[in-house]
Image (cartoon, helix red, strand yellow):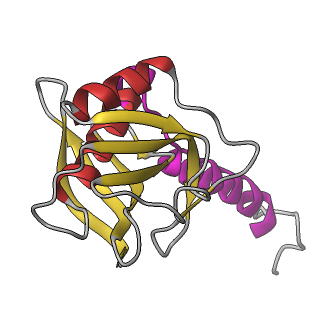
Amino acid sequence: MEPKSGEGRPSFMKFAAPLLAALVLVGSACSATSLSAESEKGLIAAAVARRALVDSSVPGVTFTTVEVVDRVGSSNADGFISFSDDDRSLTAAEREAIEQALAPAEVRFVSSTADRLIEFEDEIAVVTVARPKGDDSEATITTGLACGGTCGAGGAQRFELNDDGSWVFVENVGSQWMA
């Protein structure tokens, strides 16, 4: 004789709900960003420097001035960054690290790229940065660089933390764009 539901054998549903809840928690923990403030500062500086000094769309050009949007935006799958009123400002420590990483270029922190896109001057770039995703050993961060007309590049890049505490570029990740 086969036991009735709930008798003898536990029903599938008694196990399915807790199992599903556990899987959701594990999955969300894996995708959470857990960068310390010190690591995030170094990563943002390394990513901005990489985009402005190495991965612009004009090889060999050295920007004498780099304007950095003073907020950390959100990235999309196409490698672009958008900003909202909820985005946090770059910290004083992050600004200082960016200035050090871009030296000897003059660094200016600006509130928007909108006005600058109309009046680019020679050897000036505007860099945007999005919230990084990862942890204190490996992270992905999206940056964008605009330098007027058909000059610009952006997308996500993966970095790893060296034993000496510096972030090192590993590879481009996902969609990249170039003008």
Q: Which residues are magenta?
A: 12-39
Tell me the quarter of the picture where residue 175 sits: bottom left
User: Residue at (13%, 66%) from the top-left corner?
Assistant: 59
**Which part of the image, by quadrant, shows the N terminus?**
bottom right
Residue 25 in magenta? yes
User: Residue at (31%, 28%) from the top-left corner?
Assistant: 99
Closer to us: 151 or 17: 151
Tell me the quarter of the picture where residue 66 sits: top left
Determine whether 157 is above or below 95 in the image: below
In the image, is 85 to the left or to the right of 132?
right
Residue 82 in magenta? no
Residue 16 seen in the figure: yes
User: Residue at (64%, 35%) from the top-left corner?
Assistant: 88
**Which part of the image, by quadrant, shows the C terminus?**
bottom left
Closer to us: 72 or 11: 72
Residue 11 seen in the figure: no
Residue 54 location in percent, x, y? 17, 56
All told, the count of numbered labels is: 0
Determine whether 39 is above or below 55 in the image: above
In the image, is 79 to the left or to the right of 10?
left
- The secondary structure that most of the magenta stretch takes on is helix
Residue 102 location in percent, x, y? 24, 36
Closer to us: 125 or 87: 125
Residue 85 location in percent, x, y? 76, 44
